[in-house]
Image (tube, rainbow, N blue to C red):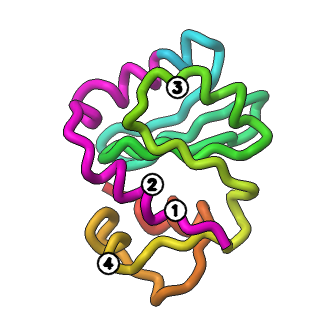
Amino acid sequence: MKDITSLIEKAFTQNVLWRNNIFYEILEEFVSNQIKVSFWEEEELWAQIFYNETIAGYMYVKYPIVLLTKEYYESLNVCLNRYDYISVIKVDSFFKEYLFIKENVLKEVFNITFGGKLISVENLWFYTNSV
């Protein structure tokens, strides 16, 4: 189990121009470093980050939350490490249900609950990606 509650809370409480400005700057920085991104504005809430044609991470549009696989963490975090307010979360797998976020934080940040169960990155992405 990996408790990421404090990292999610940190992102939620940041007072930065994330959604209106910085999110898009980072997308551009990824692209300028030959890192592919997929983000459908007005349709999705998470950008997918690709490294070597593989999904390597997700970046949330509402708050500075980035989830990166451990395989690509070092390569991708280079574009993020100058932003100390971003919650960059290194995960072992997108599919393994081992992440824990307190229910009150899930409800407040993402407007969902999972009944106290451990979740995967894919669960979080799937249930919170629609605008």
Give the residue pinned by disc 1.
4
Place of residue 111 in the rendered image (x, y in percent of width and height, measured from the top left): 30, 71
Which one is earlier in the sequence, the residue at label 3 or at label 1? Answer: 1
Q: Give amino acid for label 3.
A: Asn
Q: In what element is the residue under mark 4?
A: helix
Q: Earlier in the sequence, mark 1 or mark 4?
A: 1
Visible in this render: residue 22?
yes
Q: Is residue 110 magenta?
A: no
Query: Which residue is at a point 48% across and 42% down the rendered structure image?
Result: 59
Q: Are marks 2 and 1 in contact (CB under 8 Å)?
A: yes
The disc, 3 or 4, on the residue closer to the chain's N-terminal end is 3
Residue topped by disc 4: 104
Q: Closer to the camera, 121 or 45?
A: 121
**Residue underneath mark 3:** 81
* Marks 3,4: beta carbons within 8 A: no
Quadrant containing the C terminus is bottom left
Looking at the image, the residue that sits furthest to the top is 32
Assign the N terminus to one quadrant of the image.
bottom right
Judged left or right of residue 53, residue 121 is left
Tell me whether the residue at label 1 lies in contact with that at label 4, contact meaning CB atoms closer than 8 angstroms: no
Mark number displayed over residue 82? none
Label 2 and label 4: CA atoms lie apart by: 14 Å
The residue beneath circle 2 is: 7
| Magenta-drawn stretch, dominant element (helix, strand or loop) | helix
Q: Which numbered disc flags the more N-terminal residue, 3 or 2?
A: 2
Residue visible at 68% across and 40% down? 56
Q: Foreground: 97 or 85? A: 85
Q: Amino acid at mark 4?
A: Asn
Instruction: Give the extent of the magenta segment.
Output: 1-28
